[in-house]
């Protein structure tokens, strides 16, 4: 299972041709519209879940 913080997610999304800004990702997190988990004050993204989310099946 590959995990990423917000900067890693931004890099991953740029590499896959679906770039999103940091502020937009934070908004998606706040609105619970992107799969993530919080570990203390950190936001962690499971890349497998992000891939499914991008495909519309998360």
Image: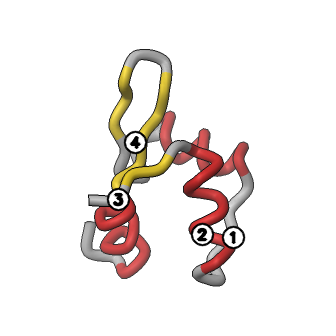
Residues marked 3 and 4 touching at CB (< 8 Å): no
* Residue beneath disc 1: 19
In which quarter of the view is residue 53 placed? Answer: bottom left
- Separation (CA) of disc 3 from disc 2: 14 Å
Do the CB atoms of the residues marked 2 and 1 lie less than 8 Å apart? yes
- Numbered disc in front, either 1 or 4: 1
At 73% across and 55% down in the image, what residue appears?
A: 21
Q: How crowded is mark 4: few (under 14 residues within 10 Å), some or many (20 or more)?
A: few
Cα distance, mark 3 to mark 4? 20 Å
Q: Which of marks 3 and 4 is nearer the N terminus?
A: 3
Q: Is residue 55 left or right of residue 13?
A: left
Q: Residue at label 2?
A: 13
Image location of residue 47, percent across then percent down: 38, 62
- Residue 2, numbered label: 3
Q: Label 1: state its secondary structure.
A: loop
Residue that extends furthest to the front in the rendered view of this protein: 1
Whether residue 32 sits left or right of residue 20 in the image: it is: left
Q: Position of residue 14 (x, y in %)?
A: 68, 72
Instruction: List the residue tagged with mark 4.
Output: 32
């Amino acid at each position: 299972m590959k995990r990423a913080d917000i900067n890693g997610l931004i890099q991953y999304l740029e590499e896959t041709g679906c770039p999103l800004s940091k502020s937009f990702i934070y908004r998606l997190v706040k609105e619970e519209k992107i799969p993530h988990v919080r570990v203390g004050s950190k936001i962690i993204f499971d890349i497998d879940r992000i891939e499914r989310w991008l495909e519309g099946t998360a």
